[in-house]
Image (spheres, rainbow, N blue to C red):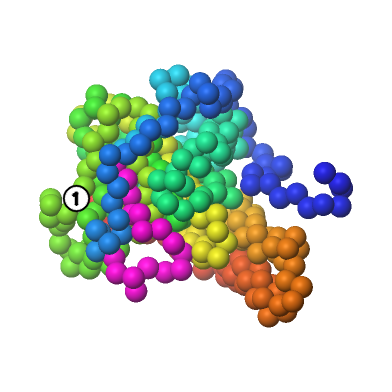
Amino acid sequence: MPAHDLTLRRFPESLPGFAPIADDPVFDPAVHLALGQPERIYSLDELGYKPNQLSEATDSAVAATDCFRILSDEGVAAMYHVCKQLEAHTTSNVRISRNTRGGVYRSRFIRDLSLSPEITEHLGTLLQSPLLPHAMGHQLAHLNYQPLTVGENIDKWHYDTLQVDYVMFVTDPNVVDGGEFQYFRGTRDEMKELHAAGQTIAPERIIAPPIPGAGYAILMQGNYVVHQARGLQSPGERITFVNGYSFADPTISDFTAFKQLRTVDPAETVDAEYARQMAYRSAQHLQACINTPHYGDTDATIKQLQRARAELDIAINALQDREDEVIKHFGD
């Protein structure tokens, strides 16, 4: 490519300097993937969402799926090997007692898995909308580990800080007591009302997809689907891998809970990552303006430039506003 052409990378060339793991396998999609199909897909309408409750941050009617396979047996073994090394870097916050974030900066295996075009295309087909791996490194490859206290929830009821993600079991959930992954059959607003009133969730409003084993995942629009991970009821090991995505179409508005992320991840790293996310979106708008100009439609050109500028204005305003937010949740 000529030096004067622009090259945009979904993952940055410069990294924040996290120490790599000692033994990092090489990711091979032909060996490590075994992509399958879910038996059941839930719509946003089934959860109770009406069109006026959905923002411009989605164009998919899919809320979530039942489980489907992502990793082969070889993939599970390699993934577990990496996750055990990353366990040394766990942190905690008010929602999760033990998680590792930023693993893409420590493991090339995790990075290549998170950015896998095979997985990305597969998930886009399931969601009925093309996707891109998230441009923020800390929104890729989130790992949850079981708390050290038996009975403590692994993750509280919440909705996510991003648009789309999958939750994959690295360990077999069928060999432990508890640890179920659960959806709320309802909307975010309904959960807020229940939480504010101190009411418990009726059993019939909880969906717990059966998980056949390690390497299986569920896909969801995480910013609309309220979900939790229950605690183990006896000592055991439970590891899940959560990978984030954005909609590929830049006309779909971004959803990133930037202020919350600054309180759970290194703030200056999050600032740089969020700038990348929004700069990339701006560049997507500009790409059409640069590569396929509207020679006979100045108004269309102006709209493209305005969209590009709007992405940057959102980012600049967020970066200049130092009022961070504690990570949100609805309790156990």
Secondary structure of residue under mark 1: strand
Is 205 contained in the magenta span?
no
Taking the image as shown, residue 143 lies to the left or right of residue 273, namely left
Taking the image as shown, residue 189 lies to the left or right of residue 313, namely left
Q: Is residue 320 visible?
A: no
Residue span colored magenta: 49-66
Q: Position of residue 9 (x, y in %)?
A: 68, 46
Kindly identify the residue that appears in the image at 42 percent across and 37 percent down. Answer: 241
In which image quadrant can residue 329 be found? Answer: bottom left
Kindly identify the residue that appears in the image at 87 percent across and 48 percent down. Answer: 3
Q: Position of residue 137 (x, y in %)?
A: 57, 46
Taking the image as shown, residue 164 lies to the left or right of residue 224, namely right
Q: Is residue 184 visible?
A: yes
Residue 280 sits above or below residue 301 on the image: above
Give the camera-side residue of 145 and 112.
112
Give the camera-side residue of 195 and 70.
70
Q: Position of residue 76 (x, y in %)?
A: 42, 24
Identity of the amino acid at label 1? Ile
Q: Position of residue 288 (x, y in %)?
A: 69, 63
Disc 1 marks which residue? 206
